[in-house]
């Protein structure tokens, strides 16, 4: 260590390990929405449009809670804000059995909104914290490592949840959906899944509470700049452009992930039992996990990030087009393969935007987090298309349009002037 290098705070590596568990936690719970859509659609006898309101309730929280979450982080600091986030998520999980006992679907939506509000605060705190825990030059590598665990959570979520949510009760052979006994059995399965997730969050909260002194010692102290409103970034065209790109990326990714269970289950595609189809969604999220490792290695070479983004968005758009025009295994595996090419989009869009934005990094980052509400608005549009189509293939026109727009963003970024190159050191991790 030279005299010009600041001493590494004691416990930084340990604090990083603690915080990385949070990436797994929110990845795991976010991936439950896909199997849950298939479950509530049968149990509550919903249309696709009504069922995808679960996605709306989840992702609208990013738009509602992101700015208050930033203010709360500035007031409480990292460890306390993270604990508040996890407690909020536990509370949301406890609302689920109350809603199912009352046979009240809007109650499930309220529960999901509460959980997602906690996840929003978790991301606002954990993303910049990971970037700050160590040498700034290696922050991008740390964030990719944390993103890997986020993808691990999204991969394991459907594998664990689908057999719980989509077997027995109304999903059993010859089950009659109007039979109160079978409905009650399926409702209790939903309860079991979310009570187990709530217990997991409670354990993580206790884990972070015991490690709070280590995290506080290694974490930076929030400044006035950290509390700056994301609205300042509206003055930067590139910040707005990047937020729109995040909007369409998250909306496209979530639309596919949430309807993939029913898509693979449909007779025209694989005609699988719902539980089996739900478990296969793990391949979609697992592809993103593998893709992040491959993309991270490629970014260590001289290949520009814009080139990789152009390639991935173009391939994802092509795969969506294939799905709309084919059926059977071709359509099924084309849809699943999109996950691999989704992998690097979120962090790359973030990085490219931060480098080109004229607004302060914290303000730009806040506006980009706000853009995640695309996951709330695009899936219901896809749900309406599904309700008015003979098959689910036309649903993929929604992400097809999204990826085409992202190709345009990537090309524009490749030609735009870099204004803030060091901004990559503060890029948040996966959503």
Image: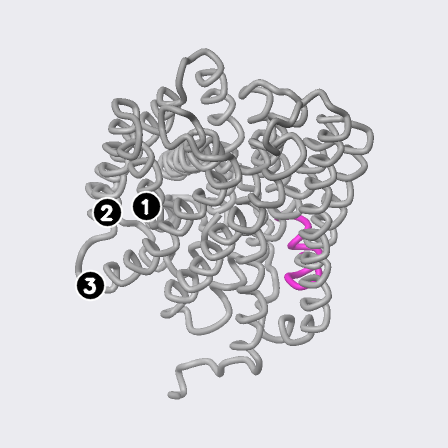
Q: How many marks?
A: 3
Which residue in the protein does label 2 denote?
306
First-in-chain label (2 vs 3) = 3
Q: Residue at x 64, y 20 (%)?
A: 45
Q: Is residue 80 magenta?
A: yes
Is residue 169 positioned above or below 176 on the image?
below
Q: Tell me: 98 left or right of 412.
A: right
Alpha carbon separation for disc pair 2 and 3: 13 Å
Q: In the rendered image of this protein, does residue 136 appear above or below residue 3?
A: above
Which quadrant would residue 80 be assigned to in this image? bottom right
Where does the image place residue 312, in percent across and percent down from the top left? 26, 43
Stretch of the chain drawn in magenta: 70-81
In the visual, does 121 lie left or right of 377? right
Q: Report the residue that reaches farthest toward the left.
A: 302
Pinpoint residue 257: horizontal percent, then vertical percent. Answer: 45, 37
Residues packed near mark 1 inside 10 Å, few (<14), some (14 to 19) or many (20 plus):
many
- Depth check, front residue: 59 or 358: 59
Disc 3 marks which residue?
301
């Amino acid at each position: 260590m030279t005299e010009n290098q600041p001493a590494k705070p004691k416990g930084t590596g340990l604090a990083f390990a603690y915080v990385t568990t949070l990436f797994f936690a929110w990845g795991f719970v976010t991936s439950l929405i896909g199997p849950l859509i298939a479950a509530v659609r049968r149990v509550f006898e919903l249309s696709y449009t009504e069922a995808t309101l679960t996605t709306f309730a989840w992702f609208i929280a990013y738009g509602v809670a992101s700015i208050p979450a930033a203010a709360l982080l500035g007031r409480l600091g990292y460890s306390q804000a993270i604990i508040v986030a996890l407690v909020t998520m536990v509370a949301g999980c406890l609302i689920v059995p109350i809603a199912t006992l009352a046979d009240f679907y809007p109650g499930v939506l309220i529960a999901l909104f509460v959980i997602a509000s906690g996840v929003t605060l978790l991301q606002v705190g954990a993303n910049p914290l990971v970037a700050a825990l160590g040498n700034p030059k290696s922050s991008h590598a740390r964030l990719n490592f944390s993103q890997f665990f986020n993808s691990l959570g999204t991969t394991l979520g459907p594998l664990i949840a689908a057999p719980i949510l989509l077997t027995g009760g109304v999903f059993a052979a010859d089950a009659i959906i109007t039979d109160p006994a079978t409905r009650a059995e399926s409702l209790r399965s939903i309860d079991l899944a979310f009570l187990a997730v709530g217990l997991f969050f409670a354990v993580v909260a206790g884990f972070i509470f015991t490690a709070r002194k280590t995290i506080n010692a290694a974490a930076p102290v929030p400044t006035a700049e950290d509390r700056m409103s994301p609205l300042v970034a509206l003055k930067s065209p590139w910040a707005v452009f990047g937020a729109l790109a995040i909007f369409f990326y998250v909306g496209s990714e979530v639309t596919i992930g949430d309807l993939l269970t029913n898509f693979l289950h449909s007779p025209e595609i694989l005609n699988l039992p719902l539980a089996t189809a739900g478990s296969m969604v793990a391949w979609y999220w697992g592809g993103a996990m593998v893709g992040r490792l491959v993309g991270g290695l490629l970014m260590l070479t001289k290949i520009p990030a814009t080139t990789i983004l152009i390639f991935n968005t173009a391939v994802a758009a092509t795969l969506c087009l294939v799905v709309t025009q084919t059926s059977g295994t071709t359509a099924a595996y084309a849809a699943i393969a999109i996950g691999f090419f989704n992998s690097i989009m979120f962090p790359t869009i973030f990085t490219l935007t931060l480098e080109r934005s004229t607004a302060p990094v914290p303000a730009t980052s806040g506006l980009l987090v706000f853009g995640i509400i695309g996951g709330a608005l695009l899936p219901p549009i896809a749900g309406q298309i599904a309700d008015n189509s003979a098959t689910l293939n036309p649903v993929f026109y929604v992400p097809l349009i999204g990826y085409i727009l992202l190709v345009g963003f990537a090309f524009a970024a490749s030609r735009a002037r870099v204004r803030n190159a060091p901004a990559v050191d503060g890029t948040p991790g996966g959503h």
